[in-house]
Image (tube, grey):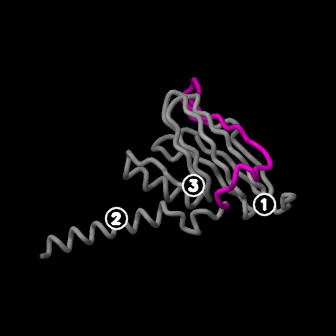
Amino acid sequence: MNSKLAILAIFFTTSAFAAGEHAGSHDEFAVGTPGNASDAARTVEVELTETEDGQMVFKPDSVDVKRGETIRFMLHNTGELEHEFVLGKHEKLMDHKKEMMSQMDMKHDDPNAAFLDPGAKAELVWTFTNSGDFQFACLIPGHFESGMVGALVVTEDTAETN
């Protein structure tokens, strides 16, 4: 009986932990909400790659938007390694980065993230509902430390809505 309870406890704890981290908790998406492509005010093309000196980078490495603006991120992994693009607050990204270190094969399946194999392209559409300083990052172990992080500034000046 004790072993059955232990197995159930592990199952429910693991499920609850995963749901808390990946099921779109309100804190996780302080940066905004998934958007509709038809509402996109503009498209921002982002290259995910490695440099000859061993750095991993986003090009561009910063994006400015207005609160209320919907952006279509067109992502292209031109590098030789897997990369990802995750939107969020710095603190939340750092918490998630620690989790990824303990689960080396984890891949994101969240509305605020896209995982790209080498050569792959992806689209992520996002509506920025809150102003503030945020980031986009690659949380694959070692990538953030190699420079794969970008600044995302959402200004209070609201976007025009039609």
Circle 1 residues within 10 Å: few <14, some 14–19, many ≥20: many
Quote the CA–CA distance across marks 3 and 1.
Answer: 19 Å
Which of pointers 3 and 2 indicates the residue nearer the eye? 3
Residue at the front extreme of this rendering: 38
Of the residues tagged 3 and 1, which is closer to the observer?
3
Amino acid type, callout 1: Arg
Q: Is residue 73 above or below residue 65?
A: above
Magenta stretch contains residue 34: yes
Regarding residue 102, the answer to whether it shows in the image is: yes
Quadrant of res 75:
top right
Which label was assigned to residue 67? 1
Depth order, front residue of 103/121: 121
First in sequence: mark 3 vs mark 1? 1
State the residue position of label 3. 111
Quadrant occupied by the C terminus: bottom right
The residues colored magenta run: 32-57
Q: What's the CA distance linking mark 2 and mark 1?
A: 35 Å
Q: Secondary structure at mark 2?
A: helix
